[in-house]
Amino acid sequence: MVLVSLALVTIGAVVVFFTPVLGVRSVRVEGTRELDQERVRQVAAIERGTPMVRVDRSGVLRRLNGISRVDSADLRFSLPSTVVIELVERRPVLFTDTPDGFRLVDDEGVDYAAVDHRPSELPELRITSEGRERQGRAAAITAVTALDDRTLGQVRTVRVDVSRGAPRVRMSLTEGRTVEWGGRNESDRKAAILPVLLSQQGEVYDVTSPELATVS
């Protein structure tokens, strides 16, 4: 009886680990918005017929996370034969206009993709001093991600001055209006006050000091 049990265990292990009986027959990709699913499958490089338990999960995830548009990736197995790739793509919050074209920037400050057309739905980021792009991006992202959707929809350009001391943010809005945002401090308070200020007639809306916000 013991020998029979051992034989069955051995046969089961061989079937699971070394035969295509429980091998990969399909790879399903979920969560894509911009990425081509076939390209994702090619990058994942999961060979059909590979026993499910022998799929190199860490290797697949490493390759998927190497795609610039991918924010995070996960892998799960749907028995008996499907590998499911779950992706979260980066979402742009700003873009930059560079000599090489328009570049998308996500909410972590990652410049992750080029696009052929000017993204009219996104604010353009302009940093006035070279060499401190990281600080400039961080300040801009703190500002725009604090805004509600309605206010953000009015922002056309985000300029960051990092030439002297801490970065200072200025936003150009529709109808020729300007928002003096200032530094990264108290961003939530500034974002809460700004819609109220924008309901008033003016050209310059200064929330640099939220307790002393002005319209002129």
Image (spheres, rainbow, N blue to C red):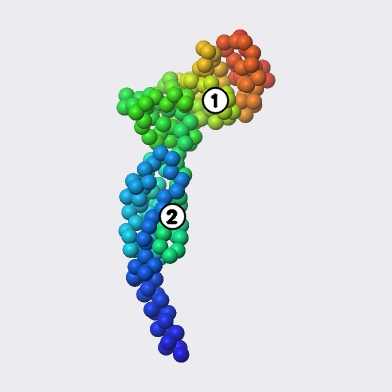
Q: Is residue 104 above or below residue 8?
A: above
For residue 216, side relative to residue 170 (left or right): right
Residue kind at label 2, given as amino acid type: Val
The number of discs equals 2
Residue drawn at x 46%, y 45% as measured from the top left: 31
Q: Is residue 104 above or below residue 212?
A: below
Classify mark 1: residues with Cα within 10 Å, few (<14), some (14-19) or many (20+).
some
Q: Which residue is mark 1?
A: 152
User: Secondary structure beneath disc 2?
Assistant: strand
Q: Position of residue 90 (x, y in %)?
A: 45, 39
Q: Is residue 50 above or below residue 139?
A: below
Q: Quadrant of residue 71?
A: top left
User: Secondary structure beneath disc 1?
Assistant: helix
For residue 29, side relative to residue 140 (left or right): left
Residue drawn at x 35%, y 25% as measured from the top left: 98
Q: Quadrant of the C terminus?
A: top right
Q: Position of residue 16 (x, y in %)?
A: 39, 71
Q: Quadrant of residue 77?
A: bottom left
Q: Which residue is mark 2?
A: 84
Q: Position of residue 25 (x, y in %)?
A: 36, 60
| C-alpha span from label 2 to label 1 | 36 Å
Comes first in the chain, label 2 or label 1: 2
Q: Is residue 139 visible?
A: no
Residue at the far bottom: name it. 1
